[in-house]
Image (tube, rainbow, N blue to C red):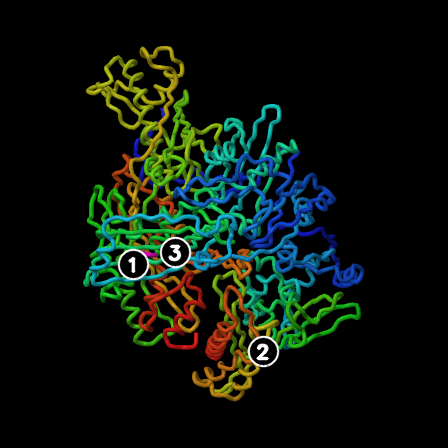
Amino acid sequence: MIPAPFEYVRAESVDHAVALLGEHGEDAKLVAGGHSLLPLMRLRLARPSVLVDVDRLDDLAYVREAGDQIEIGATTRMAEVAASEVLATHNPLVAHAAGHVGDPQVRHRGTFGGSVAHGDPASDPPTVLLALDAQMVVRGPAGERTVAARDFFKGLFETDLGPQDVLTAVRVPKLSTGTGWSYQKFHRRAIDWAIVGVAAVVERSNGSVARAAIGLTNMGLMPMRAEGVEAALAGAAAEPGALAAAAGHAPEGTSPPSDTNGSAEYRRELSKVLVRRALEEALAR
Amino acid sequence: MAQTAERVVGTEVRRKEDPELITGQARYSDDLAAPGMLWMKLVLSPFAHARITSVDVSPALQVPGVVAAFGGRDLAGEWAGPLPTAWPVTDDLKNPPMYPLATDEVRFQGEGVAVVLAESRAAAEDGAEAVVAEYDPLPVVLDMEEALKDGADLVHADLGTNASYTWTLTNGDVDAVFATAPVVVKERYVVQRQIPAAMEPRALLAEYAPAMGEYTLTTSTQIPHIVRVVLAAFVLGIPESKLRVRAPNVGGGFGSKIRVSPEESLALVLARRTGRPVKWTGDRSSDVLTTHHARDQIQEIELAADEDGRIRGYRTRLIANMGAYLLLVGPGVPLLGAFLFCGPYGGEAYHFECTGVFTNTTPTDAYRGAGRPEATYAIERAIDALARRVGRDPVEIRRMNFLPESDGPIPSPGGLTVDSGHYNGTLDKALELVGYEELRAEQRARRERGDAKQIGIGFSTYIEMCGLAPSRVLGSLKYAAGGWDAARIRVLPTGKVTAFVGVSPHGQGHATTFSQILSDDLGIPVDDIEVVHGDTALAPLGMDTYGSRSLSVGGVAVHRAADRIVEKARKIAAHELEVSEDDLEYVRGRFSVKGAPDRARTIPEVAFSAWTAHNLPEGVEPELDASAVYDPENFVYPYGAHICAVEVDTETGQVDVLRYAAVDDVGTIINPQIVDGQVAGGVIQGIAEALFEEAVYDENGDLLTSSLTNYEVPAASDVPSIRIDKTVTPSTTNELGVKGVGETGTIASPPAVINAVVDALSHLGVTEMARPATPERVWRAIQQAKGGAA
């Protein structure tokens, strides 16, 4: 439980971090709260030769309004995201999901951006961002770019981030008053990752569903959208039969894992129940 | 002169242990350092079963900071013998040797093959990683029933079998009872393997003084006295007098630190070989592989009954997984439950048999309750099955089968002599405490509405035997040691007291509880009493702490030693007051002359006289100091009624415990707060057993649940508050009237929880539920009952 030897450098700014990543090459790894990386290093499953620490870049720790969006700085602690007034007013879904990651200790050290950049399909924030069509703000050697959530998550622990890229912020939309939301996290213990998680963002219109975005946690190699459900819901009546029928499409196109917490078959069935419950809860809000 | 006016036994004296624990000042094994010490790290086998083809430690010696490294063969000459088993339960027991490091073959994932010493913990880990061990994999034996079949692959090829032993017990004409009984219920249960997971992993510091030839081992153990004799006499081959073993603060044991370990053995030998202290601290990753596992039984239980549900006979067959080797008391663990497969119920015939089997898994041994949770699980599930069969309510079937209520000894079908018990009393109280009628009404309403979330109510009316143990009984069961314990009380010149005890706590609050007993016995305030334990150089020879024995054996020894203090003090007081001993009345620390109560001597006054020794009666030695050794005549038998209400989400299989009521009778209570803490902790550990924890191997014998991310130890947020109450029926085994409380919660609770899950789904046709009742298992049971694909 002691990591293999490594060197440690602290970045003084985002540009400095980008430069340090360039200097040390592929063996360097960014660290912020360390709650994804350090356990892997202690098990010696990850052995970066250089850690570039961005944890103290306070200018990346914020939640603020940016026009019709909310911008969340990458080193904002999960607990700060969960407690954010701005999010409570304009996008409670993100705050809610952040408040259900790990335990209080994890949430007070782990950063929102770190969780997103780690690209763990069992993690809650990526799914929520995918359902919200969030934008990731990335700084690299060629400057800043913005990547849509759909294009950001590429595979198991794999994102659009290049070896010298630093995720600096995440932008999520302000939800309109006609939009309901839900995050259903199914797990055995409070501290566990989701066996299956479902994020739902549903726009209502006169008793029917105008538009629904459904994200799935831990149903494949990366967070995914339940497109079959979304298609079935477009224009559907907001009533139990229609919602249940739509939820039946949840496992389409998924490839959930089998592990000691549940088989793939169970996860597929669970996804139907949780999507239905997410839709019911979103429409009731 | 300080003297207590009120009795403190039975009151909530604040735990003396807590200030240093809460403020972080307590010193655990890992907090200790010695000048020049080396860190030790073991290299563990990644294979469950393999021939070791080579171990090359030379790359480790190139790692900066590494001082020495050894393979198993390098140290083979150090051992006087293998790590012994203290409980060879049968004459024909097969007990293959386990040495601190494997030399030719590894038989479970995590068996040590090499050891590295380095200047720092990090260097030791780097060195261990550099050791090159090569293996030739062998067939892996995991399934207990497969292992017992003819032609099965063997864990130990030279034994010719995977069976270690079969132990049997029969009372009454079992075959006749089963042949004539109109109702026979036969059930099969699997009690899953668990990992004890104490908060503090095992840790130690070994020191050697070459000029004196003396070893000191500071180790996170429950059993310093047993470690001393076993390590010295059997493993190291050194005089016992040259080994001092100390248990400092120990961060939980639950049986997992009843152990004479490879690490302790290696550290002592390597401290001698290097001339430097050796420190080892287990991490969670190694702890889950190398600290023993527990439970892991396949149970077949049959009940023979009359048509109305009155039980006449019990027949139980167990297969118990020993893992790859027999540990210290591993083979005896099922025997601790052997007499309890009849619960607190009557009957005329009883048969029990158990076969211990080897597999390529981490060896098993004691874990909170040891044998008794397994027995309680079987009988409490089976009696519910009987109730369903004869159409009775689970409360009714229990009441009609309870043993006769008694303040004195009663024989049980299992062959025990139960000290006392009023089983309806705890059940009545538990029904009220849990709000039984209200829960049943809620259950009916939800069923009528067809809610997705259904509720169920489960019972466990248990009895257990603890207070290990009468030495002659242990002898008859072939246990290699006695079950007595010892105390020495010293009243200091100023009237303060030091009590030296042979039991060795690791969270139980002995210092507080024993101080309360002594305070009442000697009239000394609790704060003026120090309790010394866990150090073989200071404490009297003792048998340590496990099996809920510390109070009902060690506490009785404390009380008896105090009686001897009073006996001696009486002589001195009579002499000074110039009356005969018979003319003195003694009440809590004060001798007074009958009829002249102002003429008195207190224990502190007598202690000072005994110390100055200026004027002692003829034949009385100086010092107020006395010892006692207590060997109980019988076990003690706590019992009670636990009722669990669960909510089951029938769409997902998720189970939540809504309410849990525990009404226990643990005899006389010394400290209610400590008792409640034991009950709550035990119940939560049992809920964990029923719903969360399961050690899982894959087909290669790789432990899948190898960290706390997927070995599901619940946290406070995952379990309910426990409603706790008690009845008090003093034990007739000892003069304090105390039973034991360390394990009752863990023994009682798993069947209450699982019975509740079954009850919640009974209207869907579910009668069986494997444990732990994970969401997927519950979901599958529902699908199966519905005739679905699962």
Three-letter amino acid code at disc 1?
Glu
> Who's the residue at 80% across and 60% down the image?
A23
> Who's the residue at 25% across and 39% down the image?
B732
Q: What separation in Å lies between label 2 and label 1 (alpha carbons)?
A: 52 Å
Q: Main secondary structure of the magenta part?
A: helix
Looking at the rendered structure, the secondary structure element under dot 2 is strand
Q: Which quarter of the picture shows residue A44?
A: bottom right
Q: Which residue is mark 1?
A: B302
Three-letter amino acid code at disc 2?
Arg
Q: Which mark is residue A31?
A: none
Which segment is the magenta one?
B378-384
Q: What separation in Å lies between label 3 and label 2 (alpha carbons)?
A: 39 Å
Closer-to-camera residue (B253/B45): B45
- Measured as percent of width and height from the top left, residue B367 is found at 43, 48
Q: Quadrant of the N terminus of chain B?
A: top left
Judge depth for marks 2 and 1 and give the one in front. Answer: 1
Q: Mark 3 — on which chain does it sit?
A: B
Q: What separation in Å lies between label 1 and label 3 (alpha carbons)?
A: 35 Å
Tags 2 and 1 on a common chain: no
Q: Is residue B141 visible?
A: yes
Q: Which residue is mark 2?
A: A225
Closer-to-camera residue (B708/B338): B338
CB-based contact (under 8 Å), mark 2 and mark 1? no
Q: Mark 2 — on which chain does it sit?
A: A
Indicate whether residue B768 is drawn in magenta.
no
Q: Quadrant of the C terminus of chain B?
A: bottom left
Q: Is residue B370 visible?
A: no
> Who's the residue at 45% across and 59% down the image?
B146
Q: Which residue is mark 3?
A: B721
